[in-house]
Image (cartoon, rainbow, N blue to C red):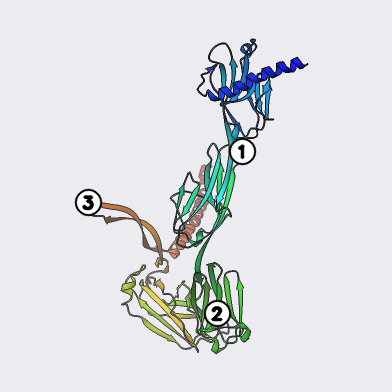
Amino acid sequence: MIVHDHKLFIVIIPIIMLDISTGEEEDKQLRIVGEEKLHKVATGSELYLECPLPMIVRRPGTIMLWRKGDRVLTAGDIKVRRDSRLHLMGNNLRIDSIGIHDGGKYSCEAEVEATEPLAVVHIVEILVPPTVKTEPKSGEITVREGTSVSIKCIANGNPSPTVKWSRNGVTLKPDRLLHGGRIEMANNGMSLTLHNAHRNHSGLYVCSASNGVGKESFGRINLLVFYSPVIKVSELIVEGGTGYRKQITCTVNSEPKPEVKWFKNSIPIRVGESLRYNIRQSGPDHHLIVKKVGEEDFANYTCSATNSLGKTETIIQLKGNPSRPEFDTRVQRNQDGSYKLQWFTTSHERILEYRLLYRLVTRAEPIDAKQDANLPWSTIVINRPDSVSEPRQTQTFILEGLRDNSPYQAKVMSRNKFGWSDFSEIVSFTTNYIISDPWIPDIFKPAIHHRTEEVERETIRKAGSNSGEQTGLGKGTVRTTEFTFPNLNQAMISATADIINQSQTIILLLCNFSILYLYPFSI
């Protein structure tokens, strides 16, 4: 037994010396058998490398080695590298649970009498699923409106991953505009820069990395754009009535969140000191409630919003005047040639007076505003309007003596005990052509209809002496007048029916005549 152990010791020594010596001979030439084999292996899987040199290895005195690069893994049946994942399967090598550092050049070599060892070479490439690291690591970033901001998504893997960005579920592309800011991507998409950041750029940005190995990897960054308060109001002038409850509202958006205060004629409103007012908030909407409006509450109210970036104020007027009247655009023609105008206005107090203005214009719509400014208005004062108890009040008026087939404009304003309203918007209408000759039957009197429509039309504009003329499509207005004869059409239908009935009667009479007068002669 002692001699046997000694022989084993003698065998091991040359192998170790061979490993050391081969490390110094980096330029040692190998006689490669066959072509190099490429293996692409994903991390975590099993790698099996073959060594098809069985006849050579069996020769007496031949030593077979497995190497990774210059490092010896096995020599003969002995495993030199202490790695539990390495297994000799005859002459072949199996590696379990492949990791990212297992890639490289593997070779099985047979030392023979020739000066150049025989070798079979395997090239192993490790496929690594993508991983993502965001910058900043916290996944949160804030920036001031108007500046530029960069967010990063560092992606690793083999092959190199492809990186894509999305915001709130919408894919982003480079060199595109997003709410007025330009998107720039660099470093194979791993860096995204927003120039001229806008408040609407706030949101969740998601980067996705994929390379065909494993699953996609995602990174998430929440961007918050800071900006000074922005106030929006639906009405700058609010009509109210004494004894009624009234609510004034302003909508405030800002980041960071603002502090909102209310003022009456520049004096702060403190809810705890007054029973007349109440203040409420619903999201970005801030409400000032006047519980019971009195004449002293008709004033200017200021909605003031402040945050760390600035201060914004908007003035809202509460008044008892009527609201701006609204016309019913359907101007009706009466049988006598007069025209009926109708409008609506809101007033919590009784309307005392209307002032109706109308005028004849030179041509139909569209009207040149500069030309209209010089056209005179005729004024009608309505001192006894219809009296109603509801806040929404309706008034009608009959215009007489208008020129036939002519374009007109009208506007109106109303007054209660607190003053006048603003003028309504201008309503435009065209009078119809009226045939008054009593000798012409009604069936030949036309009904006239006007129709205005937007159309595309070809336009030509001069572009300069060198570039010549350029032609394009523009929009214009076409006004069409249609003449129809509804009475005539009905009359023709009735006449046709009478002709058919009369024809049927004549045919029956002819048939009876034939039977009575011709039948005896046939006998």
Q: Position of residue 426 (x, y in %)?
A: 41, 74
Identify the mark nearer the N-term, 2 or 3. Answer: 2
Question: Depth check: 105 or 163 in front?
Answer: 105
Is residue 303 in view from this perspective? Answer: yes
The local secondary structure at tag 2 comes to: strand
What type is the residue that disc 1 sits on? Answer: Gly
The residue lying furthest to the right in this view is 1
Q: Residue at x 53, y 13 (%)?
A: 115
State the separation of the CA atoms marked 1 and 3: 61 Å
Question: Depth check: 127 or 264 in front?
Answer: 127
What type is the residue that disc 3 sits on? Answer: Asn
Residue 293 sits above or below residue 80 on the image: below
The dot on residue 303 is none
Residue 162 sits above or below residue 136 on the image: above
Q: Which residue is mark 2?
A: 262
Q: Which residue is mark 1?
A: 214
| Quarter location, residue 5 | top right
Question: Depth check: 234 or 43 in front?
Answer: 43
Is residue 345 in view from this perspective? Answer: no
Circles 1 and 2: CB atoms closer than 8 Å: no
Q: Position of residue 328 (x, y in %)?
A: 48, 74
Q: Which residue is mark 3?
A: 466
| Quarter location, residue 357 | bottom left
Q: Residue at x 76, y 17 (%)?
A: 2
